[in-house]
């Protein structure tokens, strides 16, 4: 029985696709081993959203080569979509597969490929206009599963490589979404995270067109025993209808990740982002009025071309007063194929680093303030299992995305318990199970 190991970089969509790859190999008789061990096949499900992600992808390919120089080494996903030739010339992969091909990996691994002459199969994901359901039986872990309901993006923000790696926006049909949810629920999952590259565009390419809010409504009503979370959603697509569903349904997790990218209207315009800082602020306030316990996280890019100290201050000033749950801070990373590479006013690396450090520090403060707001409050926690540092303690995730630790007591794995939060602990909260 051949052994394979897989490592995944990047977003939740990639994690979902790695679960598909893993399952297809297991069904074909391959056995999974740890990525640090000896395997016959190493698969790196790559990311290229920043230069660092591409670098990490190459590092993992090189590590595979060191672990077993005679193995099959497959570089798959977004990085090959834009730099297959470069990967091929480096002699670090025997098989180089794009985002479509990686979902049929078993077939391609049977074809010959070597470090000198790798098999390169990257059909233009760009030309694909529909999304097929690959039914998934299992998902790593036992409590929370991801489900990709949308792929691709048509927006072409000026810094973003993703439309080039993922192609046009396309949606999984409603019926297929419901089928996969039923599968996961039948296998005992208590939380399903609906993911996509541009999730808010779900349904726009279907005939007749549909909306994400109408899909969510059907899901929330049809599966009351399971809770649902949505991954990143763009500000213009976070509609009143979605917020109303979140306010009205207990099984809609009180967590939103809404990329801001910049608090300066001038920079947002250059980024080709279709909203203003004022719009974002209003949306934030409206969402918190409707869902007070909401965890709101965001992405922000610092050092975009043309970002002066004054424009950076506009971002800082906007964020300073928001009760955020967390921030993901990214120094601008110029990507080939995107217009921003050629924009004037490129910001020196040192400045980007300094601005990122300032926002990350602010993020730490925000995080503590957010967690402190829930001291003495009851959180609904999906129990994941033991806390590795102390076997007498369990840990889980609250509806509003807080990691919560508590004495095991009678709490069962994969159940939802009520925990009263008592103190800040390990970037989360420590509490006691009640009721
Ligand atoms: S909306 Fe913009 S940032 Fe998001 S994937 Fe599309 S192009 Fe990239």
Image (tube, grey):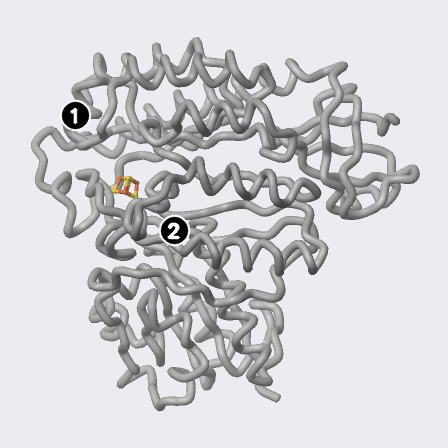
**How many numbered marks have been drawn onto this rendered protein structure?**
2
> Residue at the spot x=30%, y=52% of the render?
207
Q: Is residue 23 above or below residue 186?
A: below
Displayed-image quarter of ligand 1? top left
Direction right: furthest residue = 409
Please tell me whether mark 2 sits on a helix, a strand or a loop. strand
Tell me residue 286's x, y (percent). Answer: 44, 14
Task: Classify mark 1: residues with Cα within 10 Å, few (<14), some (14-19) or many (20+).
Answer: some
- In the drawing, what numbered circle is on residue 150? 2
- In the picture of the structure, the residue carrying the numbered disc 1 is 269
Q: Nearer the viewer, residue 325 or 51?
A: 325
Classify residue 365 as left or right of residue 308.
right
Q: Is residue 178 above or below residue 371?
A: below
Residue 405 image label:
none
- State the residue at coordinates (45%, 38%): 214
Indicate which disc, 2 or 1, sits on the residue closer to the N terminus. Answer: 2
Q: Position of residue 41 (x, y in %)?
A: 49, 79
Residue at point 49% right, 63% down?
A: 18
Q: Residue furthest front?
A: 208
- Specify few, some or many for label 2: CA neighbours under 10 Å numbering under 14, 14-19, or 20 or more: many
Image position, residue 186 (x, y; %): 69, 59
From the image, state whether disc 2 or disc 1 is nearer to you.
2
Which residue is pictured at 38% across the width and 39% down the height? 211
Determine whether, in the image, residue 413 is placed left or right of residue 334: right
On-image quarter of the N terminus? bottom right
Where does the C terminus fall, quadrant-wise?
Answer: top right
Q: Are dots 2 and 1 in contact, CB under 8 Å?
A: no
Q: CA distance from mark 2 to mark 1?
A: 26 Å
Residue 390 screen position, x and y as percent: 83, 42
Q: Is residue 112 visible?
A: yes
Vertical arrangement, residue 81 with respect to residue 343, above or below = below
């Amino acid at each position: 029985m051949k052994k394979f190991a897989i490592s995944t970089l990047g977003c939740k969509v990639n994690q979902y696709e790695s679960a598909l790859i893993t399952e297809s190999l297991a069904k074909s008789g391959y056995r999974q081993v740890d990525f640090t061990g000896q395997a016959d096949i190493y698969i790196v499900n790559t990311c290229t959203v920043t230069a660092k992600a591409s670098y990490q992808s190459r590092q993992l390919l090189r590590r595979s080569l060191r672990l077993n120089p005679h193995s099959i080494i497959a570089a798959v996903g977004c990085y090959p979509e834009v730099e297959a030739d470069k990967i091929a010339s480096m002699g670090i992969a025997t098989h180089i597969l794009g985002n479509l091909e990686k979902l049929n990996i078993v077939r391609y691994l049977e074809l010959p490929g070597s470090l000198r002459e790798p098999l390169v199969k990257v059909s233009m994901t760009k030309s694909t206009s529909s999304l097929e359901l690959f039914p998934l039986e299992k998902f790593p872990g036992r409590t929370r599963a991801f489900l990709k309901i949308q792929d691709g993006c048509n927006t072409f923000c000026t810094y973003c490589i993703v439309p080039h790696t993922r192609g046009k926006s396309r949606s999984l049909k409603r019926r297929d979404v419901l089928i996969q949810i039923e599968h996961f629920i039948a296998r005992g999952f208590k939380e399903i995270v609906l993911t996509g590259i541009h999730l808010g565009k779900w349904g726009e390419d279907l005939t007749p067109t549909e909306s994400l809010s109408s899909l969510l409504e059907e899901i929330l009503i049809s599966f009351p025993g399971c809770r649902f979370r949505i991954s990143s959603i763009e500000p213009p697509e976070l509609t009143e209808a979605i917020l109303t569903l979140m306010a009205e349904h207990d099984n809609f997790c009180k967590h939103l990740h809404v990329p801001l990218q910049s608090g300066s209207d001038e920079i947002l315009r250059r980024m080709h982002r279709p909203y203003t800082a004022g719009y974002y602020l209003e949306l934030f306030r409206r969402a918190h009025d409707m869902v007070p316990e909401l965890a709101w996280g965001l992405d922000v890019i610092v050092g975009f071309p043309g970002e002066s100290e004054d424009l950076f201050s506009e971002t800082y000033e906007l964020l300073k007063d928001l009760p955020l749950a967390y921030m993901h801070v990214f120094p601008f990373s110029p990507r080939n194929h995107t217009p921003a590479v050629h924009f004037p006013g490129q910001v020196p690396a040192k400045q980007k680093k300094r601005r990122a450090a300032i926002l990350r520090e602010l993020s730490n403060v925000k995080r503590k303030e957010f967690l402190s707001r829930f001291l003495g409050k009851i959180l609904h926690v999906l129990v994941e299992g033991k806390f590795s540092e102390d076997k007498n303690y369990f840990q889980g995730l609250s509806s509003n995305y807080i990691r919560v630790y508590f004495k095991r007591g009678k709490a069962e794995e994969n159940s939802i318990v009520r925990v009263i939060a008592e103190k800040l602990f390990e970037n989360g909260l420590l509490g006691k199970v009640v009721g």
